[in-house]
Image (cartoon, helix red, strand yellow):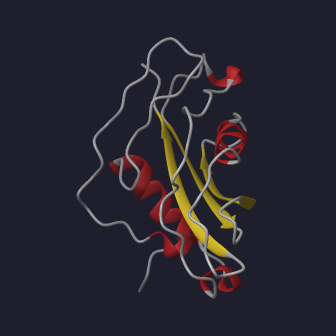
Protein backbone atom coordinates (compact mmCIF):
# COMPACT_ATOMS: atom_id res chain seq x y z
CA UNK A 1 0.00 0.00 0.00
CA UNK A 2 1.63 3.30 -1.06
CA UNK A 3 2.18 6.06 1.47
CA UNK A 4 0.08 9.17 1.15
CA UNK A 5 1.86 12.37 -0.02
CA UNK A 6 1.81 13.89 3.48
CA UNK A 7 3.60 10.84 4.92
CA UNK A 8 6.15 10.92 2.09
CA UNK A 9 6.71 14.62 2.70
CA UNK A 10 7.31 14.12 6.42
CA UNK A 11 9.71 11.29 5.58
CA UNK A 12 11.63 13.56 3.18
CA UNK A 13 11.74 16.34 5.77
CA UNK A 14 13.06 14.08 8.50
CA UNK A 15 15.52 12.20 6.30
CA UNK A 16 16.75 15.22 4.31
CA UNK A 17 16.10 13.41 1.02
CA UNK A 18 15.61 14.54 -2.56
CA UNK A 19 17.22 17.90 -3.25
CA UNK A 20 19.36 18.09 -0.12
CA UNK A 21 19.60 21.21 1.98
CA UNK A 22 20.31 24.45 0.15
CA UNK A 23 21.71 27.59 1.67
CA UNK A 24 19.36 30.56 1.73
CA UNK A 25 20.08 34.27 1.57
CA UNK A 26 19.34 37.15 3.99
CA UNK A 27 19.87 35.34 7.28
CA UNK A 28 22.82 34.79 9.63
CA UNK A 29 24.23 31.33 8.85
CA UNK A 30 23.10 28.41 6.70
CA UNK A 31 24.32 24.98 5.85
CA UNK A 32 24.12 22.73 2.84
CA UNK A 33 23.70 18.99 3.35
CA UNK A 34 24.83 16.51 0.71
CA UNK A 35 22.20 15.05 -1.56
CA UNK A 36 20.93 11.73 -0.32
CA UNK A 37 21.77 8.61 -2.29
CA UNK A 38 18.33 7.18 -1.46
CA UNK A 39 15.87 7.47 -4.35
CA UNK A 40 12.77 9.49 -3.52
CA UNK A 41 9.59 9.04 -5.56
CA UNK A 42 8.11 12.51 -5.89
CA UNK A 43 5.30 11.41 -8.23
CA UNK A 44 2.98 11.10 -5.21
CA UNK A 45 2.85 14.90 -5.16
CA UNK A 46 1.51 15.11 -8.73
CA UNK A 47 -2.16 15.38 -9.60
CA UNK A 48 -3.59 13.08 -12.27
CA UNK A 49 -3.48 15.86 -14.87
CA UNK A 50 0.16 16.66 -13.98
CA UNK A 51 1.09 12.98 -14.36
CA UNK A 52 -0.14 13.17 -17.97
CA UNK A 53 2.58 15.74 -18.81
CA UNK A 54 6.17 14.76 -19.53
CA UNK A 55 8.70 15.45 -16.77
CA UNK A 56 11.22 18.26 -17.27
CA UNK A 57 14.92 17.81 -16.63
CA UNK A 58 16.51 20.13 -14.08
CA UNK A 59 16.82 23.85 -14.76
CA UNK A 60 19.60 25.11 -17.04
CA UNK A 61 19.68 28.43 -15.21
CA UNK A 62 18.89 29.14 -11.58
CA UNK A 63 20.34 32.15 -9.88
CA UNK A 64 21.02 32.53 -6.19
CA UNK A 65 19.14 30.82 -3.41
CA UNK A 66 15.70 31.34 -1.91
CA UNK A 67 15.38 34.08 0.67
CA UNK A 68 14.85 32.83 4.23
CA UNK A 69 11.50 34.40 5.26
CA UNK A 70 11.85 37.29 7.72
CA UNK A 71 8.95 36.07 9.87
CA UNK A 72 10.73 32.71 10.29
CA UNK A 73 14.16 33.99 11.38
CA UNK A 74 13.37 33.55 15.08
CA UNK A 75 11.71 30.21 14.35
CA UNK A 76 15.03 28.58 13.45
CA UNK A 77 13.69 25.09 12.67
CA UNK A 78 14.26 23.29 9.37
CA UNK A 79 11.57 23.68 6.74
CA UNK A 80 10.75 21.87 3.52
CA UNK A 81 8.67 22.95 0.55
CA UNK A 82 7.57 20.77 -2.35
CA UNK A 83 6.58 22.74 -5.45
CA UNK A 84 5.25 21.41 -8.72
CA UNK A 85 6.40 23.66 -11.56
CA UNK A 86 4.72 23.79 -14.93
CA UNK A 87 7.29 24.54 -17.63
CA UNK A 88 6.33 26.08 -20.98
CA UNK A 89 7.83 25.14 -24.36
CA UNK A 90 10.34 28.02 -24.26
CA UNK A 91 11.67 26.81 -20.88
CA UNK A 92 9.94 29.41 -18.71
CA UNK A 93 8.15 28.62 -15.44
CA UNK A 94 4.49 29.08 -16.36
CA UNK A 95 2.95 28.24 -12.99
CA UNK A 96 3.72 26.78 -9.59
CA UNK A 97 1.63 24.74 -7.19
CA UNK A 98 2.50 24.20 -3.55
CA UNK A 99 2.27 20.43 -3.05
CA UNK A 100 3.50 20.52 0.55
CA UNK A 101 5.01 22.91 3.06
CA UNK A 102 6.26 22.06 6.54
CA UNK A 103 5.85 24.10 8.67
CA UNK A 104 2.99 25.94 7.02
CA UNK A 105 2.39 29.67 7.22
CA UNK A 106 5.95 30.92 7.75
CA UNK A 107 6.54 32.12 4.17
CA UNK A 108 8.83 29.30 3.01
CA UNK A 109 6.60 28.39 0.04
CA UNK A 110 6.28 32.02 -1.08
CA UNK A 111 10.07 32.49 -0.91
CA UNK A 112 10.61 29.32 -2.94
CA UNK A 113 8.00 30.34 -5.53
CA UNK A 114 9.62 33.76 -5.92
CA UNK A 115 13.02 32.09 -6.44
CA UNK A 116 11.92 29.51 -9.04
CA UNK A 117 10.13 32.09 -11.19
CA UNK A 118 13.64 33.24 -12.22
CA UNK A 119 14.66 29.77 -13.44
CA UNK A 120 14.93 28.67 -17.06
CA UNK A 121 14.66 25.16 -18.43
CA UNK A 122 15.67 23.75 -21.81
CA UNK A 123 13.23 24.39 -24.64
CA UNK A 124 10.97 21.50 -25.56
CA UNK A 125 8.51 20.50 -28.28
CA UNK A 126 5.96 19.75 -25.54
CA UNK A 127 3.45 22.50 -24.69
CA UNK A 128 3.86 21.79 -20.96
CA UNK A 129 6.17 19.75 -18.75
CA UNK A 130 6.27 19.36 -14.97
CA UNK A 131 9.16 19.51 -12.56
CA UNK A 132 8.92 18.64 -8.87
CA UNK A 133 11.21 20.61 -6.57
CA UNK A 134 11.85 19.69 -2.95
CA UNK A 135 13.53 22.65 -1.23
CA UNK A 136 14.91 22.35 2.28
CA UNK A 137 15.70 25.33 4.51
CA UNK A 138 18.09 25.00 7.44
CA UNK A 139 19.05 27.91 9.66
CA UNK A 140 22.02 27.51 12.00
Residue at position x 52%, y 28% in the image: 24
Q: Give left or right: position of 10 versus 40.
A: right
With respect to residue 69, does 34 lie above or below? Answer: below
Q: Residue furthest top?
A: 28
Q: Give left or right: position of 134 versus 129.
A: left
Of residues 139 and 130, the one drawn nearer to the viewer in this rendering: 130
Q: How many labels sit on residues?
A: 0
Of residues 47 and 62, the one drawn nearer to the viewer in this rendering: 62
**Quarter of the image where the C terminus is located:** top left
Residue at position x 70%, y 59% in the image: 92
Q: Quadrant of residue 45?
A: bottom right
- Expressed as whole percent of the image width and height from the top left, the position of residue 95 reads 76, 61
Of residues 88 and 65, the one drawn nearer to the viewer in this rendering: 88
- Expressed as whole percent of the image width and height from the top left, the position of residue 53 reads 63, 83
- Expressed as whole percent of the image width and height from the top left, the position of residue 102 reads 58, 46
- Expressed as whole percent of the image width and height from the top left, the position of residue 2 reads 43, 82
Q: Residue furthest left?
A: 37
**Quarter of the image where the N terminus is located:** bottom left
Q: Give left or right: position of 21 versus 54.
A: left
Residue at position x 48%, y 60% in the image: 58
Amino acid sequence: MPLNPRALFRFALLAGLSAGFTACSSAPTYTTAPQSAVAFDDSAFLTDSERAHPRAEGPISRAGTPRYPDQALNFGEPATVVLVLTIGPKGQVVSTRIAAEEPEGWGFAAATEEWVRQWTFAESPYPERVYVLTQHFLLQ
